[in-house]
Amino acid sequence: MDIKGNVSQIIKLVGGKENVNSATHCVTRLRIILNDKKLVNVKELEKLEIVKGCFDSSGQFQIIIGPGLVEKVYKEFVVQTGAKEVSREEVKEITNKNNNILQRGVRILADIFIPILPAIVASGLLMGLNNMLSNPGIFFEQSVLEAYPGISGIVGIINLIANTAFTFLPALIGWSAVKKFGGNPVLGIVLGLVLVHPQLMSAYDYAANPDAAPVWNIFGLEVAQVGYQGQVVPVLIAAFIIAKTENFLKRILPDTIQLVLVSPLAVLFTGLVTFMAIGPITMAGANLITDGVVNLFDVAPVLAGAVYGLINPPLIITGMHHLFLGVNLQMAGTLGYVTLWPIGETVTLAMGTAALTMFFILKNKKSKSIAVTSTISAWLGITEPAIYGVNLRFKYPFIAVMLGSAAGSAFLAYNNIKATSVGVGGIFSFLSVYPEQWGIYFTGMAITFVITVGLTVILSRSKKFIDVEDEV
């Protein structure tokens, strides 16, 4: 592939190097800040061999290249344009100025939760492995552990490691949140550990018997000595306070005493405020959200699952799906399982399935190539190439994705599917689902697959869509 030639054409079609302000890249996309977006020739740009699709989002013009190749394209792009290389964080700051309050809030949550996802996903997969070894009826009538008691030590270590991320979830969130809010991330770790200190009564024990909680007497007020294991909202608010408190103290205290006073004062003040007010209020609110979601799926599981599956694809485009990361983590921490994540995973399968179906429908060789490569990416958990390169571009596959995902999610919700935690996306997502529910999970995915394929084929023959592209 002629990378230099393709990059030269990209530069020409985005309005020339004079129109390029700065650039960065992510796993699959070249992200460009342009001076004038009206100069971009999208139709010709998408015809290039190296381009799998392009779109504008929140002030960034994003060109889908694909994993691995995007790094080579980015380096050549910078060489040919002399564009300012900026980090993804700097680009986010630039684009956030164009976002409304809700979009900024969602972006903040995404920036906090995404960095800790590897730890959460690893824990989820290890919990799934522990369940496979410990539960009877999966491979034998008895469990693997009962059949081979010699592996009890290994299973014990797996269980310990699997539970660690959720046991100290406030410390992980505290680190990421304080870093995002502009404070010292080490203080975020300390704050999170304070909230799960073994001296405190566990949040799980408190939920079962709140009257048994010991109390501190602070200025005549009785403050419960309760930990915040598995909680998300309390530590988010506390992280914001400690970051702002730290920065405030740095502004008002002389440099000579900052090292001695800033950290202890910030931690002490935030700890007091959290235990006295923020913690009890936000924990109650967070538990209400969790209970509300669980009750919704208990009362009307089919409707709730169908609606969630239907809106999930457009939520991914807007980035609003990151809102549910916090809900899933809250569920994992307080209930010990998650329901939203496995129910919503139908959309990942559907995105890849629609793209694969389009491979057999499309006639243009480049579009067929994009369809098959984006299918592989989607089924491995990276859906952007399938979304922007195929499904959203031709419109009707995206409609099929929404309806196929809705049907599969309705089935999974009806059967009360559960996963140990947020897991790896794509075809390996079943590893985080409870093994005894694998049959149900595979059936829901099969429903999604069949309906997505069928609707994509049917809609491709509709007069409304048949001329959407000359190559169809």
Image: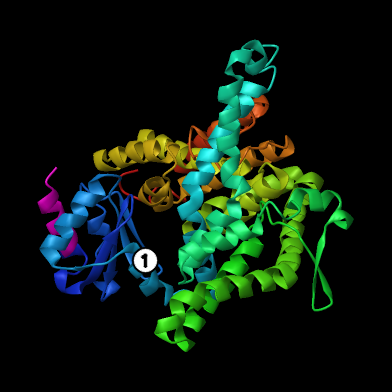
88, above or below 270, in the image: above
Q: Name above or below for residue 432 compared with residue 94.
A: above
Q: Which residues are magenta?
A: 1-11
Q: Main secondary structure of the magenta part?
A: helix
Look at the image and tell me in which quarter the N terminus lies: top left
User: Viewed as shown, does residue 17 lie left or right of 294?
Assistant: left
Residue denoted by label 1: 89
Q: Is residue 100 left or right of residue 137?
A: left
Residue 289, compared with residue 238, is above or below; it is above
**Callout 1: 10 Å neighbours few (<14), some, many (20+)?**
few
The image shows residue 152 at horizontal and vertical percentages of 61, 20
Residue 15, quarter of picture:
bottom left
Indicate the position of residue 238 as horizontal and vertical percent values: 61, 68
Q: Is residue 414 magenta?
A: no
Total count of labels: 1
What is the quadrant of residue 144 in the picture? top right
Q: Secondary structure at mark 1?
A: helix
Q: Is residue 55 left or right of residue 324?
A: left
Q: Nearer the viewer, residue 455 or 94?
A: 94
* Coloration mode: rainbow
Q: Residue at left 10%, top 52%?
A: 5
Q: Residue at x 59, y 65 (%)?
A: 236
The answer to whether residue 358 shows anywhere in this view is: no
The type of residue carrying mark 1 is Glu
Task: Say if 450 sits above or below 315 in the image.
Answer: above
Can you give x and y, in whole percent of width and height, for residue 337 in the image? 67, 41
Between 435 and 213, the residue placed more toward the observer is 213
Residue sitting nearer the eye, 143 or 365: 143
Q: Quadrant of the C terminus?
A: top left
The residue at the point 71 percent across, 67 percent down is 275
Does residue 336 appear anywhere in the picture? Answer: yes
Question: Residue 426: image x %, image y %?
Answer: 48, 37
